[in-house]
Image: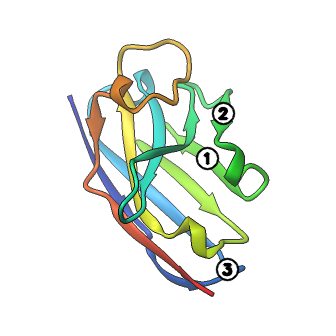
Amino acid sequence: QVQLVESGGGLVQAGGSLRLSCAAAGRTFSSYTMGWFRQAPGKEREFVAAISKSGASTDYTDSVKGRFTISRDNAKNTVYLQMNSLKPEDTAVYYCAADARNYYITYVSKEYDYWGQGTQVSVSS
């Protein structure tokens, strides 16, 4: 089992940047595929980005490609989401999640086994 704690959210103007971190407590962090999801008010939770166990493979939803970068440091048990050129439509609660079962990256939220509590990202226009 793994416990996930997100940090780094906040209020930023459009065009600005934020870096989210997700620290994992527990054993074998490197055995989990990690993902970031977000949920805006009145909307369903959506996939943002994911990274493979080794960090060699990544995937992004189309709306963030070229602006967001997911990375991980297995020595620090941490996954990051660097968010640049933020837009008001990026406003949401951002969650990190860990997938213990699948070999390949998945964007399906129910495939993820463990979730953090979320961190709020607000982008003003």
State the residue position of label 2.
Answer: 58
Where on the picture, by quarter, is residue 71? Answer: top right
Q: Which residue is drawn at 66% across and 71% down?
A: 86
Q: Which amino acid does label 3 sit on?
A: Gly
Residue at image coords 67%, 27%? 57
As drawn, 20 above or below 13: above
Three-letter code, disc 2: Thr
Query: Which quarter of the figure has residue 56?
Result: top right
- Are the residues tagged 1 and 3 within 8 Å (C-beta)? no
Q: Bin the neighbour count of mark 1 within 10 Å (Cα to Cα): few under 14, some 14-19, many 20 and up.
A: many
Label 3 belongs to which residue? 16
- Vertical relation: 116 (above or below) 86: above
- Mark 2 vs mark 1, CA separation in Å: 7 Å
**3D distance between C-alphas at marks 1 and 3:** 17 Å
Mark 1 or mark 3: which comes first in sequence? Answer: 3
Residue matched to label 1: 70
